[in-house]
Image (spheres, rainbow, N blue to C red):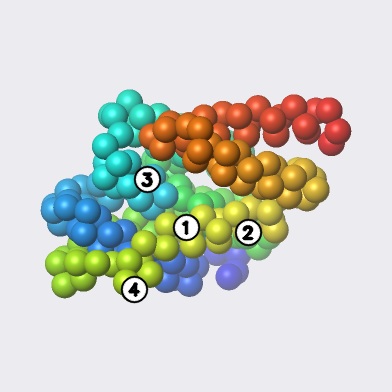
Amino acid sequence: MNSSLTAKTGMKDTIPTLAGYIGVGLAFGVVAKAAGLSVFVIILMSVVTYSGAAQFVIVSMLLAGSTFFAILTSVFLLSTRMFLMGMTVAPFLNQESMTRNIILGSLLTDETFALSMNKLNYTNRTLSFPWLNAANLLAYSTWIVASGVGGALGSLIPNPSQFGMDFAFLAMFIGLLYLQVAADRTISLTLQLIMILIVLGLVYVGLILIPSNLLLIIVTLIGCGMGVALKHAFF
């Protein structure tokens, strides 16, 4: 990685992250196909939703018979972190227009956000539309193609769980959690570890007491509330 902020450099800098999009995209396509979705619907979901975590949740909640409102709310809560990521990146794009910032924010992902934060170390704390837009578009197109190929291959793998592909969703979140804890210095490490244990406990108890289609929403709201309270009280 260097100080260049051209579109060509943006694509070059993004290449090392594409393995993640390909791996999870293929797994999503296979799992979604096994759940009964057509290749067209799988590709359409990747084009419109463009969120591995949200797309896995949608498929699992559809299989569980969840209501439209429950799915919509779960996906919204799961994706709220993107508001924070967008607001974090925006100050480094002050020279760009509002329209360009909206375009960049719409295609921002965990990976391109992390890439942007790393790029700042080489560019005197600035970013550019050509660089980040090229990174976003390459990641976006890779995700769409990978999920479509996974969907096409899904008919050859009627039971993806035998290959561990149903674990891809969980594995992705374990990776994201590790990166969050390792990189975030704005919140005490002790508080983060405490909240992880609290959320695990809430999920365990919730699986016994709360309907599965409401579990994610309720645990998220309770966990967020407890985290804010603990931070203000002790950290």
Cβ atoms at labels 3 and 2 below 8 Å apart: no
For marks 1 and 4, give the CA distance: 14 Å
Q: Which residue is mark 4?
A: 163
Which residue does the image show at 69% across and 30% down from the upper left?
A: 226
Q: Which residue is mark 2?
A: 178
How far from the left and from the top, in percent, is residue 53? 42, 49
Which residue does the image show at 36% across and 29% down from the upper left?
A: 70
Which residue does the image show at 51% across and 33% down from the upper left?
A: 209
Label 3 crowding class (10 Å Cα cut-off): few <14, some 14-19, many 20+? some
* Amino acid, disc 4: Phe
N-terminal label among 1 and 3: 3
Element on which disc 2 rests: helix
Element on which disc 1 rests: helix
Q: Tag on residue 170?
A: 1
Which residue does the image show at 38% across and 34% down from the upper left?
A: 213
Cβ atoms at labels 1 and 3 below 8 Å apart: no
Label 4 crowding class (10 Å Cα cut-off): few <14, some 14-19, many 20+? few
For marks 1 and 2, give the CA distance: 12 Å
* Amino acid, disc 1: Leu
Q: Which residue is mark 3?
A: 57
* Amino acid, disc 3: Val
Residue 142 shows in this picture: no
